[in-house]
Amino acid sequence: MININEVIETNQMIEKENLDVRTVTLGISLLDCISDDVGTLCDNIYRRITQTAKDLVKTGHDIEREYAIPIVNKRISVTPIALIGASACKSTDDYVRIARTLDKAAKEVGVNFLGGFSALPAKGMTRSEELLIRSIPDALSQTERVCASVNLGSTKTGINMDAVRLMGQIIKQTAHLTADQDSIGCAKLVVLCNAPDDNPFMAGAFHGVTETDDVINVGVSGPGVINHAIQSVKGRPFGELCDTIKKTAFKVTRLGQLVAQEASRRLGIPYGIVDLSLAPTPAVGDSIAEILESMGLEMVGAPGTTAALALLNDAVKKGGIMASSYVGGLSGAFIPVSEDHGMISSAIKGCLTLEKLEAMTCVCSVGLDMIAVPGKTSASTISGIIADEMAIGMINQKTTAVRIIPVEGKDEGQTAEFGGLLGSGPVMRVNPYSCEDFISRGGRIPAPVHSFKN
Amino acid sequence: MEKSKSIITVVGKDQVGIIARVTTYLYECNVNIEDISQSIVGGYFNMMMIVDATQANREFLTLSQELEDLGKRIGVMIKLQREDIFKSMQRI
């Protein structure tokens, strides 16, 4: 039987250490909505989403209240729209119309983000994919809740450098069209390498074609809980540190598994995966940087940061995998600069640089995330940063991503304000030397060799 | 399969009548108390009850809200949660 100390421990995690379920994301396949008429297509999409997700937010609230556990976000991911719109969309305006339909459906069912305004040109880019990508700046500036993502490469296909070059320009245009809000459009746009089909986290969530019609995926969190737990092993050897993280990650993940099963049962929609990611929020006590600093770093970004992050990420997975029947998504520690107050402080002091962040992404899942850079940064430099990150993912057989915001009108040392969960962040220094000639070559970087690993 | 149980926790400054008022309310709602334990943590009164609310004469979320309101009147924090959350986190 459950004893009082166990109850107190769990409730303390929730009340004092910011334990929560970060997202319950309902994946919806839109393949059955396809039509060659854009009006019919939009009607089909709106009907499909609003019918399938009509009880999502209420069910999330009920679970929150019955277990007294916060579920921060209820979200939707859909089949990549470049596939769904291929037959109907003849212009970028047609794709913008679909984006507005998605936004309207998201508002109708009460979710705060809907992901899947996506294209997957990892090897070659179809005409439809190119149209969708070119519609992204308008789509993101005319909608509030739609998130866009583009998969630019994979370990199996190499990197589509034409698409990488195009995305540098698209990110700049998106920044320009949302300049009045510190270029917030770019916070809803991510490019990936090895994008997973079942990721519940925004902005990269989409419902892949390998998935069933509808599915519930859950993203757990809990940096504050991990941080609190490792306070008790201060100065102890690494084995003890890892064990402590594993045990805590187990408990956190079990909570995700419970919520996933409950949501699935109540909605009558199968449960897909639990994503084991540690996701920070701008709140104090909910930070990945704090965990790394509790391990013994004076400040995140100091030498030892990459090793500390590698250890953390691996221990979270080891603890979480046993706690859940199906693990998927990104499953790693997120390091979004503007959403983590420890990362922000370190970036302001100049301890955390873009180059150190890039190194950190070699050992954790997500990549360069929520990084504000000067508005004057050129499209080719942004493409260069993307290409570097895609190369890390391709060679290391892992997911990497870039969500970078060239804040129009702002320069190094100023602050960009995005508000809410997206936080605020210092505009960081970018290496000033050019990669223009490299990026303008065109074509693709061939898939890497899969032996002779070094 | 064992019927699903719920856990009521009461946290706050100790005073006369906390248990009396909570249990009276539970009696009115037809909620059966199966176990009570308490401890003092950090100077605060902590009480936990394992209850069976399956025969209750009102909805789970109503019970939860009314207990929370009762807590506010007494000056303690009262929470009703389904037991599964503790079982899944604390047991393999």
Image: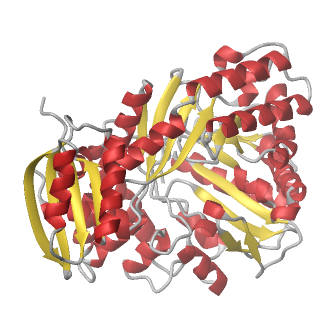
How far from the left and from the top, in percent, is residue A279?
A: 49, 59
**In the image, residue A226 above or below residue A204:** below
**In the image, residue A38 above or below residue A438:** above
Q: Is residue A406 visible?
A: yes
How far from the left and from the top, in percent, is residue A94?
A: 88, 28
Residue drawn where x is 54% and y is 24% of the image? A210
Residue drawn where x is 61% and y is 76% of the image? A344
Q: In which quarter of the image is residue A442?
A: top right
Could you tell whether B54 is left or right of A299 in the image?
Answer: left
Q: Quadrant of residue A166?
A: top right
Q: Is residue A131 visible?
A: no
Q: Give the mark count.
A: 0
**In the image, residue A209 above or below residue A146:** above
Name the residue nearer the viewer: A133 or B51.
B51
How far from the left and from the top, in percent, is residue B8?
A: 22, 55
Could you tell whether A9 is left or right of A227 in the image?
Answer: left
How far from the left and from the top, in percent, is residue A379?
A: 86, 57
**In the image, residue A290 above or below residue A5:** below
Residue drawn where x is 75% and y is 48% of the image? A144
Could you tell whether B15 is left or right of A203 in the image?
Answer: left
Q: Quadrant of residue A79?
A: top right
* Type of colouring: secondary structure
